[in-house]
Image (cartoon, coloured by chain):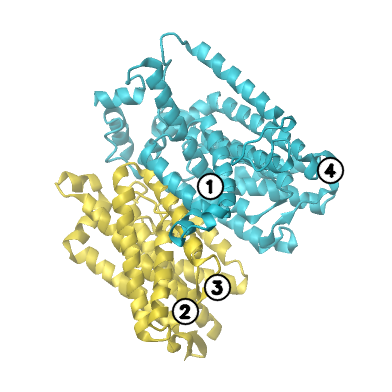
Amino acid sequence: MSASTEELEDQHGGRGGREGSSATDRLKASLTPPPTPGPSGPGRSPTRRRLIGGVAAVAGVVALALLPLLNVQLPGILPTATYQPGALQLMALCLLMGAAALTYHLLIGVAGLLSFGHALYVGAGAYVLGILLERTGMGLIPAMLLTLLVVVILANVTGAVALRVSGIPFAMVTLAFAQAGSVLVRRNPDGATGGEEGLSLNTEQVPAFLVGVSNTRNLYWLSLAVLIIVFAIVSWIQNSRAGHLAEAVRENENRVRVLGLKPYLAKLLIFVVGGTLAGCVGMVHLLLQSGAVPRTVSADFTITLLVMVVLGGVGSRWGAVVGGVLYTLLDQRLTVLAQSEAIQSMPALLRVPLSEPLFLLGTLFVLVVLFMPGGLAGFVRRLSARSGSGRPGKDPVTVLEQAE
Amino acid sequence: MDTILLLLVTGIGLGAVYFLVASGLSLIYGLMGVLNFAHGAFLTLGALIGWETARVMGADSWGGFALSLLVGCLVGALLAALTEFVLIRPLYERHIEQVLVTVGLNLAAIALFEGIWGTDPVFIQGPTWMGMTTNILGAQVPNHLFITILIAGLVLAGMVLFLKRTRYGMIIRAGVENRSMVTALGIDVRRAFTLVFTIGGAAAGIGGVLASHYFGYVSPLLGGSLLIFAFIVTVIGGLGSLAGAAVASVLVGVLQQFANYFWSIGDFVVVILLAVVLLTRPSGLMGRKVATA
């Protein structure tokens, strides 16, 4: 039995002794985020740290909520002043992508599930709501509730099938489901999805305060609300018994099974919650962009989410949000930068790579994976560990490595 | 009857293209546990540079075609070897990071190709004979399919011979079976890693040139769609199994053609096939067990 050897290796080998274990376990072990460090200095107790974190979070949210009322200019980062629609649209998109990355964090960071089909649920949220509004004449709220139900069922069915396997096969099944969804959307059955062109939002049933350029700030606040709600639900799930169980499954599935607990149900719960929240993000995305495009269902979009989460740091909630915001901002601003005079007048050798935002983002991503393990969150953690205690080795991972 | 025959041959032709991409993926995963997302970039670069070569040499000459295959093969192999050496090797034994690096490379490389060659597909041509058809039992079969199938067959035979008859082939097979044992016997498996990447890249480069003739165009996006199907083929065949990749490629290619022709649901059928295979045999058709697969 491979189970017993894995158990043994896990007890003795730690990080160094993964050589012989199965591919799935190796995958899982490397997905594991580094353990959170303890209090970083004698003066700061955990409760006090939590208090400081809470105050900072509230202050951040208040600042974000006030931005549409202020005239803040950030040349180079935002296209216009913060109270104008151009900047609000971009900021709202950033917040939504942060929320989307957060739902993906629930899968990869908490349960260790490497899914390549997460875009399916974002796309389902956007397209189902769009089609309901277009075809049925339902009000926005009932249509949203019905969409939610559809996404929950979709996530349950696909999750129940995909979770029969794990590791790379799981990644492939989810990829295949998303691919089927993507093909369906591009096929444009009965003219419902609009094919490659996408589906434009029918604003008849949408309340007036969510429609039009002048109401962009309402959509911004809606996006901010979505981000906060998603963050709250993800935190709650992660700290619930089911979340702990999912984390235990990520660490060692066999051990959880031996304890008499059911890994399958814990993983399914996480998968469905992640998918449902992604569907909600998709719905607001439809409202914000006044339409849905096939890209939101594509494998490329899932990979974008993966890149966001990894940039921010796998296993960190705020890392995922920052990764999502940063990626979206960079993607948008680099596109604008590419058309600028300075880049266009460069010789071709420099101009061609610099005018491709995805080339720069891909390169940045590779560099982060190679030289900044743990992404932004890992970087900040190392920084605070160094300045907080004055001596390295507080981090449990470092202690483990030194012991070996 | 003639329609069925035509669908069968085009299906096998498509399967041949899938095989050229999937064989490398499968070997790389089997030996190293890395799902190589950059494989699409190897393929695309092979196709693009191959077409540039053919155009310089004269696209309708056999010499140009042969040289484009050779150049595509070399470009794919070189890029793959470089990838393994520069990006994969420093992350030895950290599988998820290795996968992520290939994801990033794929993003960056495809964007760069788009910057150089543009996003629009470029329609290509080969030697005149390849554009014609041959009558087989009433079916008008395009000639380029024979070339594609022949070359994929040769690549398969070459790979099998290499794996069965050479010392390095033996090390690779042993490594797929049980890598820690090979390492314990004092053999440096890492050299086999570079080798497997190079072989996979070479096959993908050839696959890229042949795929561009199969579809009739080259574009920086050529690799993306092929890669997803190659992944599916690899998983259906059993990760790490060359024979499985060959069987599954033909199976998927033929099934896709038939389902597309009769019900135009080829892509769905492939997805359903994948789900069914994974649920009944999680390790794929010819994979041994999940652990080594």
Circle 1 is placed at which residue position? Answer: A304
The residue lying at 31 percent from left, 63 percent from top is: B77
Task: Look at the picture and state if A74 lies above or below B273.
Answer: above
Subunit ID for the residue under disc 3: B
Cα–Cα gap, marks 3 and 2: 11 Å
Horizontal side, residue A55 vs residue A220: left or right:
left
Subunit ID for the residue under disc 2: B
Cα–Cα gap, marks 2 and 1: 37 Å
The residue lying at 65 percent from left, 38 percent from top is: A91
- Residue furthest to the left: B186
Q: In the rendering, which numbered label is found on residue B258? A: 3
Cα–Cα gap, marks 1 and 4: 32 Å
Q: In the rendering, which numbered label is found on residue A139? A: 4
- Give B158 or A388, whichever is nearer the viewer: A388
Three-letter code for the amino acid on which mark 4 is drawn: Gly
User: Which SS class for mark 3?
Assistant: helix
**Can residue B48 be seen here?**
yes
- Tell which tag, 1 or 4, sits nearer the viewer: 1
Cα–Cα gap, marks 1 and 3: 34 Å
* Disc nearer the start of the sequence (3/2): 2
Subunit ID for the residue under disc 1: A
Circle 2 is placed at which residue position? Answer: B9
State the quadrant of the N terminus of chain A. top left
Task: Look at the picture and state if A355 lies above or below B129.
Answer: above
Three-letter code for the amino acid on which mark 1 is drawn: Thr
User: Which SS class for mark 2?
Assistant: helix
User: Which SS class for mark 4?
Assistant: loop
**Can residue B242 be seen here?**
no
Based on the displayed image, in which of its 4 quarters is residue B80 positioned? bottom left
State the quadrant of the C terminus of chain A. top left
Three-letter code for the amino acid on which mark 2 is drawn: Val
